[in-house]
Image (cartoon, grey):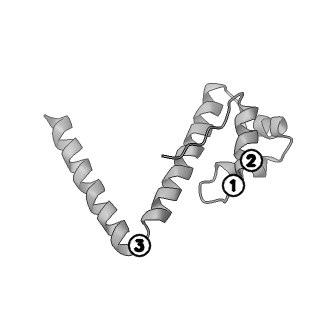
Amino acid sequence: MLKTVLAGYFLHSLTKKLFYFMEEGICDEVNELAAKRLISYQLQQAMRDQKLSKSTIAKKMKTSRVAVDNILDPTFNTSIDSLERFACALGKKLTISLN
């Protein structure tokens, strides 16, 4: 019962926020930031799973640790090339899809 109540509250709260973003004309910006945060989270999770530090990733990418920090920063404008190199350093492949 508590899960149902919390889920209902969460959905109501999310709906209110979505309408607010639409009214303010910032829905696209919010979606973009959410996507960037998700990518950053996935990269950091893969680093944790493999017990790799930012310095180790930087060495594998042949770049600086600051560059790695920038890639992981969702507010930084990261290139697809940088994301591909980061994924490669993790032994992964970057996949982009259109829905």
Specify the amino acid type for callout 3.
Answer: Gly
Farthest left residue in view: 1
Please state the horizontal and vertical placement of residue 71, each as a whole percent of the image. Answer: 69, 50
Residue 27 shown left or right of residue 94 in the figure: left
Farthest bottom residue in view: 24
Q: Is residue 25 above or below residue 44?
A: below
Q: Secondary structure at mark 3?
A: loop
Which quadrant of the figure contains the N terminus? top left
Please state the horizontal and vertical placement of residue 93, each as a whole percent of the image. Answer: 68, 32
Quadrant of residue 16 within the rendered picture: bottom left
Q: Secondary structure at mark 1?
A: loop
Distance in Å between CA atoms under marks 2 and 1? 7 Å
Quadrant of residue 87 within the rendered picture: top right
Q: Secondary structure at mark 2?
A: helix
The crowding category of the residue bearing disc 1, from other C-alpha atoms within 10 Å (few below 14, some 14 to 19, many at least 20), is some
Please state the horizontal and vertical placement of residue 38, each as a whole percent of the image. Answer: 52, 45
Q: Earlier in the sequence, mark 3 or mark 1?
A: 3
* Label number found at residue 25: 3
Q: Are marks 2 and 1 in contact (CB under 8 Å)?
A: yes
All told, the count of numbered labels is: 3
Q: Are marks 3 and 2 in contact (CB under 8 Å)?
A: no
Front-most of residues 2 and 80: 80
Quadrant of residue 6 within the rendered picture: top left
Specify the amino acid type for callout 2.
Answer: Ser
Q: Is residue 51 above or below residue 57?
A: above
Which residue in the structure is indicated by mark 2? 82
Q: Residue at x 53, y 46 (%)?
A: 98
* Label number found at residue 78: 1
